[in-house]
Amino acid sequence: MRSPLISLLLVGALALSGCAAATPSPEADPTAAATTEASSDAGAGADCEGIAVIVDFGTLDEDAASECVDATSATAAADALDEAGVTTEGSVEWGDAIVCRVNDRPGPDETVEVAGEASFVESCQSMPPAYAYWALWVKPSAGAEWEYAQEGLGTLELEPGQSVGLVYTTGTETPTPAG
């Protein structure tokens, strides 16, 4: 039986994530322009007839990536990520219902620092802190707005023309993927 505190933390993290703020403008956030440029250069998104996969490492100091995965029917999000060359790791407690690491980031020996918060090393034992985690997004069609995923990678199914995005989110805002 899970403790009420763990359940409350999970619900709180998901609730905070669902209150997504718009992606900051390049003028407001100088790193936003670099992220948008990196995602656009990779070629996924509006022109993808399969499933667009977008990964934004945020403050983890790694280039954003996007890939268009061939798909002609419903595809598991985990399979689309795998085909795009994106690896994910869940947590010991929650499995693939949450995303703890993407392409081994943050690494098990990497100290994550967020302004105004305690630094930490992600162990992937349980829920990550509410101020530093991977947010999972879905875009139902090329012209649609990004929506916070309502389920984890283990159950999320995508149709051709949809996009899936992972954004390493720090602080109080949850930016959407660029692209």
Image: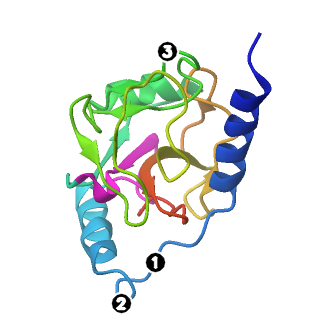
Identify the residue at horizontal 69%, vertical 28% (top origin): 6
Q: Is residue 101 magenta?
A: no
Question: Which residue does the image show at 27% across and 33% down from the upper left?
Answer: 103
Q: Nearer the N terminus, badge 3 or badge 1?
A: 1
Image: 74 above or below 38: above
Q: Amino acid at mark 2?
A: Glu
Q: Which contiguous range is marked in magenta?
A: 44-60
Q: Quadrant of residue 53?
A: top left
Dot 2: what SS?
loop
Q: Position of residue 114 (x, y in %)?
A: 37, 59
Instruction: Kindly identify the residue that appears in the image at 46 percent across and 40 percent down.
Output: 51
The residue singled out by tag 2 in the image is 27
The amino acid on which the numbered mark 1 sits, given as a three-letter code, is Pro
The quarter of the image holding the N terminus is top right
Q: x%, y% of residue 77?
A: 51, 29
For marks 3 and 2 on the same chain, the one whose residue lies earlier in the sequence: 2
Identify whether 4 is placed above or below 25.
Answer: above
Label 1: element kind:
loop
Q: Nearer the viewer, residue 150 or 129?
A: 129
Please give left or right for residue 151 compared with residue 170 in the image.
right
| Distance of label 3 from label 2 (alpha carbons) | 40 Å
Q: Position of residue 161 (x, y in %)?
A: 54, 46
Mark 3–mark 1 distance (CA, rounded to whole Å): 33 Å
Give the residue at mark 1.
24
Q: Quadrant of the C terminus?
A: bottom left
How dense is the environment of label 1, judged by Cα within 10 Å: few (below 14), some, or many (20 and up)? some
Residue 133: image tag = none
Q: Looking at the image, which residue is at 41% across and 57% down? A: 47
**Label 3: which residue?**
92
